[in-house]
Amino acid sequence: MRRIPRKVEVEHEPGKFTRYLRHDNGEGFVSPHASVHPDATIRPGAYVEAGARVGAHAKVGRFSWVDVDAVVGRGARVDENVHVGVRGVVGDDARVGSGTRLGTDSRVPSGVVVPPDAIVPDGETAHGERRRKDFGTAA
């Protein structure tokens, strides 16, 4: 059985390395200077940078990047291949579709669903449908 190393180093410029730890829940890469709740899921190939925060029950998809000082709120879902820009905020229970790019200081309000491949410019707030929480039962 192949053992996956717990600590990794990535050379981002010649001679300059950034160290990451593998998150226990999902095996994605997390900076030792980030705050990720133990119940959050960071999928393989995803990165959470220094100063970033990921809340309880949040999910960060494969090959996504939560940049420096960004926030992914409680219960939020960031799908595959998403970039949450520097100081970007994904609110509690929000969902960001695959391939989306959130600019620096951008915001996704709590409960909002951003469709796949969207671009939210620097400093802007994403607009989208609100996630419904009032699901009834079928008759």
Image: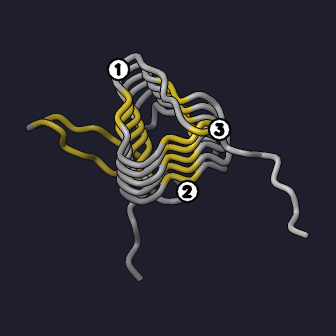
Badge nearest the viewer, 2 or 1: 1
Residue farthest right in this picture = 139
Left or right of 94, for residue 116: left
Instruction: List x then y, in percent, for residue 135.
Output: 81, 54
CB-based contact (under 8 Å), mark 1 and mark 3: no
- Residue located 78% across and 46% down the image: 133
Badge 1 amino acid? Asp
- Residue located 38% across and 78% down the image: 2
Residue 122 got which mark?
1
Quarter of the N terminus within the rendering: bottom left
Badge 2 amino acid? Asp
Q: Around disc 3, counting alpha carbons within 10 Å, would you say few (fewer than 14), some (14 to 19), or many (20 or more)?
A: some
- Residue located 39% across and 27% down the image: 68
For marks 2 and 1 on the same chain, the one whose residue lies earlier in the sequence: 2
Secondary structure under badge 2? loop
How many marks the image carries: the answer is: 3
Q: Where is residue 37, by image quadrant?
A: top right
Circle 2 is placed at which residue position?
24
Circle 3 is placed at which residue position?
130
Instruction: List x then y, in percent, for residue 38.
Output: 64, 47
Left or right of 26, for residue 102: left
CB-based contact (under 8 Å), mark 3 and mark 2: no
Quarter of the C terminus within the rendering: bottom right
Secondary structure under badge 1? loop
Instruction: List x then y, in percent, for residue 116.
Output: 41, 49
Task: Using the numbered discs, state the Cα–Cα distance from disc 1 to disc 3 in whole angstroms.
Answer: 22 Å
- Residue located 48% across and 22% down the image: 125
Foreground: 33 or 56?
56
Instruction: List x then y, in percent, for residue 128.
Output: 54, 36
Task: Using the numbered discs, state the Cα–Cα distance from disc 3 to disc 2 in whole angstroms.
Answer: 31 Å
Task: Using the numbered discs, state the Cα–Cα distance from disc 2 to disc 1 in whole angstroms.
Answer: 32 Å
Badge nearest the viewer, 1 or 3: 3
